[in-house]
Image (tube, rainbow, N blue to C red):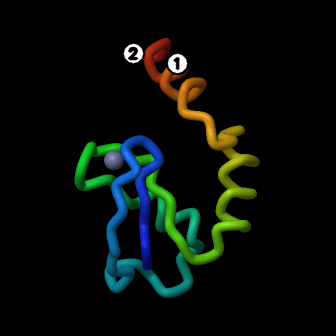
Amino acid sequence: MAAHCHDCRHHAIVSTDRFPPDLPIPEISLRLRCSACGSKRVGVMMDMQAHYAWLTAETGWKMEVRPFRTMVEAVA
Ligand SMILES: [Zn+2]
């Protein structure tokens, strides 16, 4: 499937052979890491509408990078 990094816009095709076939897409995205910048905010391009709905529900992410980075800096 196609994956993309939310932080640096890196795109890549990743194999899902190493994941269980019944693993939900959001779970797969959590197991991916960007090979360009190391970010774990990786999205997968299969059912984007459902993915974004899940992402928004879980993290409040709405196409905005600044709030997330502010949160990370506060934790660090
Ligand atoms: Zn990246």
Give percent across and percent down for residue 59: 66, 40
Residue 33 lies, in percent from the top left, at: 33, 54
x and y percentages locating residue 75 in the rendered image = 47, 16
- Mark 2 / mark 1, whichever is N-terminal: 1
| Label 2 to label 1: alpha-carbon separation | 10 Å
Amino acid type assigned to the residue bearing label 2 in the image = Ala
Position above or below: 8 against 22: above
Residue at point 43%, 73% (across, down): 2
The quarter of the picture where residue 35 lies is: bottom left
Under circle 2, the secondary element is loop
- For the residue pair 51 and 19, the one nearer the viewer reads as 51
Q: Which residue is mark 1?
A: 70
Which residue in the protein does label 2 denote? 76
- Identify the residue at image location x=53%, y=71%: 45
**Three-letter amino acid code of the residue under disc 1:** Thr
Q: What is the quadrant of the N terminus in the image?
A: bottom left
Q: Name above or below for residue 56 compared with residue 20.
A: above
| Numbered tag placed on residue 37 in the rendering | none
* 12 over 22 or under it: above or below: above
Q: Position of residue 27 (x, y in %)?
A: 53, 64
**Residue at disc 1, secondary structure:** helix
23 w.r.t. 65: above or below: below
Q: Is residue 17 left or right of residue 30?
A: left
Whether disc 1's CB lies below 8 Å from ligand 1 is answered: no
Q: Is residue 65 left or right of residue 15?
A: right
Residue at 49%, 87% (x, y): give it. Answer: 21
